[in-house]
Image (cartoon, grey):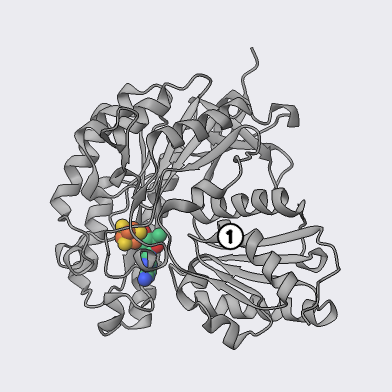
Amino acid sequence: MKQQSTTSLDTLFIKTYGCQMNEYDSSRMADLMKEAYGLRLVAKPEDADVILMNTCSIREKAEDKVYSELGRYRKIKDKRPDLIIGVGGCVGQQEGKRIQQRAPYVDAVFGPQTYHKLPEMIATIRRDRVRVSETDMPEIEKFDHLPTPKSNGFSGFVTIMEGCDKFCTFCVVPYTRGAEISRPVSDILHECQQLLDEGVIEISLLGQNVNGYRGEGEDGDEWDFTMLLYAVGKLEGLKRLRFSTSHPMEMTDELVVAFADIPVLMPYLHLPVQSGSDAMLKAMHRGHVRDDYFPMIDDLRKHCPDISLSSDFIVGFPGETDEDFEQTLDLVRRVDYDFAYCFKYSPRPGTPASKSDDNVAEDVKDVRLQQLLELTREQTRHHMQQQIGKTVQVLVERESRTDGDMQGRSSDYRIVHFEGQTRQIGQIMPVRITQAYGQSLRGELILA
Ligand code: 5AD
Ligand code: SF4
């Protein structure tokens, strides 16, 4: 006869890796488990009755990291066999049941599109004492099963689309998160409104490729991303609107103009280009050439002179020559980025590029990465220096971990530290910048 589990579930620990989408998904998982089982989040896995890993497989050694972390949880489970361990996210999707073959103490495996089934999975595990795995990709049903989002009180995230159809040859996302699916405009506006009703003043719209958004509009027609932005931008009480991530191939003139036109749309754009070489862009299947990118940047700066710009870069993609890499450095010099995120190429399972020879030697990748980091860090430092003397509006986020001061973000997404008080958290305060560091700023609060 099957045994009914008797131990109560009180506590939940979530370990999150990767992108903002995963951060968002983890907070939704926490909401879901709170609603279904009354679970409260704890800071240490040792204190938890349920441990969930929300994993990322975008770059190197993702699977190894998961298994080594699981080894740690296994020791906890040896002492407390009723502990429930779940592995979700992109590694969950990609590895599926293989995880439970290698780590049989894992009770649940699920993907980014199935975590809404967590309460049901946990119930099955407890009732039937079985292991479960849920890695199919139902259309967007997930969102119909999630509770109302909770925010930190002043800043919230709303997913507007899921997945990616671009199939860049290095990238695992189209396989782990599935095809692009856009949520209807009315659902998004409703979720934004709920956040605003809770007192949120900053909303970030999330998606793998937000400017590929094609959702059902309130008039029944298909709306593109810019139309959605205008609608969200009009919501009463919203002070700051952000979005991430965008693809250069789907930049439109309307989106450029929106930066000048929508007062709450913050002047910061992450527009990953990955490489400055046409040969590499083609091999990566990025769908544009380098000369398409410069006019976008010029237009953005023309319409919104204060905009800060960032990009992702991959060095050492298969076949990348010194000349190709030089083209990347050249593009970076021409654009002059405020921030950059630079990665060494690593083959990801199942991607087209992983079938090519990973033929740029590791030490060459290291040297290129170093060179690119030096250049982009210098640009960041320079842009930070230029902020000195300016008064910027800072949304105060929290106490700084390093110096006990307060910390927040300026409109153009720079981290700003200043001497303040915890009661200022969640407010937008004017701060005059007095010092610039490599990656952040320091300033003085301007009191009215
Ligand atoms: N190797 C290195 N970097 C990668 N990225 C995605 N896939 C890979 C890979 N296989 C980087 C890209 C992307 C960012 C999120 O991660 O630069 O924009
Ligand atoms: Fe990956 Fe390319 Fe899609 Fe971005 S656009 S998620 S890099 S496939």
**Disc 1 crowd, CA 10 A, few/some/many (<14, 14-19, 20+):** some
- Tell me the element at label 1: helix
Task: Please state which of residues 4 and 205 is positioned toward the viewer in this rendering.
Answer: 4
Percent of width and height locating residue 164: 33, 57
The C terminus sits in image quarter = top right
| Residue 359 visible in the snapshot | no
Report which residue position mark 1 lands on: 117
Percent of width and height locating residue 40: 77, 52
Q: In which quarter of the image is residue 287?
A: bottom left
Using the image, determine if residue 271 lies above or below residue 91: above
- Left of 307 or right of it: where is 407? right
Asked if ligand 2 lies within 8 A of label 1, the reply is no
| Residue 77 visible in the snapshot | yes
Using the image, determine if residue 75 lies above or below residue 93: below
Q: Residue at x 35, y 34 (%)?
A: 307
Q: Which residue is drawn at 43% across and 63% down?
A: 137
Q: Which residue is drawn at 50% across and 48% down?
A: 143
Percent of width and height locating residue 420: 71, 29
Dividing the image into four quarters, tell me where ligand 2 lies.
Answer: bottom left
Task: Please state which of residues 144 and 110 is positioned toward the viewer in this rendering.
Answer: 144
Q: Residue at x 63, y 25 (%)?
A: 427
Q: Residue furthest front?
A: 1
- Left of 142 or right of it: where is 14? right
Residue kind at label 1, given as amino acid type: Lys
